[in-house]
Amino acid sequence: MPTMKQNTIGQSDEQRKPLPLPKTSPKPMSDNGQILSVNRKALEINLNPTIFGSFAEIGGGQEVVRNFFQAGGASGTVAKSISAYDKRFSDALYCSEKPSKRYVSRERLELMLSAEYDEITSLLADSEKGEIRFFAFADTVSTLNFKKDNISHGWMGVKYQLTPQSQPNQVIIHIRLLENDSLLQQNTLGILGVNLLYACYFHWQWPNTFLLSLMDNLSPDRLAITMMHMSGPELSYVDNRLLGVQLVKNGMTNAIMFDQNGNVQEPDDMLYKTNVLIFRGSFRPVTHVSVDMLKSSFALFEKDKDYDRFNTLSLCEITLNNLLQEGSFDERDFLDRVDVLNEMGQNVMVSNFREFYKVVNYLSQFRINKFRLVIGIETFVKVMQPKYYANLRGGIIEAIGHLFPENVKVYVYPALDQSTGKLLTLNELHFPVETVHLFEHLKANRKILDVPGIYPAFLRIYSHDVLEKIRSGQPGWENDVPAFVAERIKSRRLFGYSEPTQ
């Protein structure tokens, strides 16, 4: 086996060495970097005498295991294939004690993986197969229905051994199926499933390669992988947060989400029928202004008559454009920002959206109850400039239509007028004739609101100035950030921190 390469998601060669495969395991058929066909991947697994397991597929047919049967030699790989399509059978097989609330969910997938893996290892542990490495493959999917009015998505995963008689590893992904035909979606599922099982055995040492190989023989217009999680004794080196942001960087999804504990979450599970306050920023670093924008915006949100604090979450968004603003993706810098936001109790979203209306478009698909977008007033002025929407057939009118669906309002945080030093709010804004009526319409219908109760002294703080002071060792920047943020910047030497100059 080739030695472990330096990868951008896990640890280096010196920190961790890959475990050797069993001696009976042949080398992969391809060593030249070419993409193998679906049939070739399935055949390669079938001809490997050490890989043996079961397939459980619900909702989209048995498309994955079909590829292994069609490739030939499936008796060497497939111990069992099952599709408990009826919900009562599924409950009886996978959750007899307490049925899942949702059949297409991570909870149901993990129940399936555990049940299938426990069964095959208990039945065949003493078999004559010698150095066998067992696996359980499972998926639970909702493909396009007859009326074509449902959300096509699903969960897919593998629980498997990399060495005989070892503790299992587990890889789980969530997908959105984008094709407008159920047969095409089933074909996509079959290809993705083969790619996933192949990657689990042949690319597990290189997370970036693992990730990219999932899209072999597929294109981004067929599906999006919105969440991925790797765990287990041989996969413990993987940082799932960086794995998630790589999904966005590689164009495999538009956004990835992390809860306040830093765990990768599937957006639909996280946002379904919640109230959401989203704040876009660089958070480099978090300043008093950042905290005040969140607190004062939440105070405004709480004034809604049907506001429910138990069903409301804030989401700090970092755009990929900000992550790449210096020409390269600094993974350590990204983790530093996420860590600080998590320690503030914030959820984090990383996206590839430049325009705000695309953020709203994306999040609206998750059936959010109320959606509030926090924008600084200087940024809002840019949002109202037609030149940024020249690529849209409807121009700014189309963009504003996407930005303000029924459940969305924009909270505008004030700034200091640079020329007068006075507070700049919506009432002080003036727009040219082509947009002034649009602006007045949004104001009159309370689609845009000033954020009240702010601390004017904080408006003199600019994150780029604070960052420059941190890097150059200038004193006084500690006064511009929360105390715990200052402590973490110093103790962890974040954002290029330099000791104060004498």
Image (cartoon, rainbow, N blue to C red):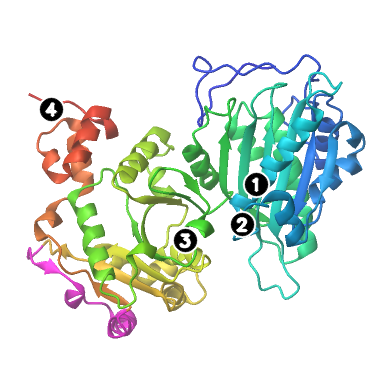
Element class at badge 3: helix
In the image, which disc is placed on residue 100?
2
Circle 3 is placed at which residue position? 271
Q: Quadrant of the C terminus?
A: top left
Image location of residue 318, percent across then percent down: 38, 50
Amino acid at pointer 2: Ser
Query: Along the horizontal axis of the image, is 290 left or right of 158?
Result: left
Q: Which residues are magenta?
A: 419-446
445 drawn magenta? yes
Element class at badge 2: loop
Circle 1 is placed at which residue position? 111
Amino acid at pointer 1: Leu
Q: How far apart are the alpha carbons under marks 3 and 1?
A: 23 Å
Query: Along the horizontal axis of the image, is 89 left or right of 200?
Result: right
Q: How many C-alpha atoms fall within 10 Å of the one at disc 2: few (<14), some, or many (≥20)?
A: some
Image location of residue 269, percent across then percent down: 52, 57
81 drawn magenta? no
Sequence order check, earlier mark of 4 and 1: 1
Q: Residue at x 19, y 54 (%)?
A: 289
Q: How far apart are the alpha carbons under marks 3 and 2?
A: 19 Å
Q: How many C-alpha atoms fall within 10 Å of the one at disc 1: few (<14), some, or many (≥20)?
A: some
Q: How far apart are the alpha carbons under marks 1 and 2?
A: 9 Å
Amino acid at pointer 4: Pro
Query: Along the horizontal axis of the image, is 484 left or right of 30?
Result: left
Circle 4 is placed at which residue position? 500
Q: Quadrant of residue 315?
A: bottom left
| Residue 64 visible somewhere in the drawing | yes
Amino acid at pointer 3: Leu
Q: Quadrant of the N terminus?
A: top right
Contact between marks 1 and 2 (CB within 8 A): the answer is yes
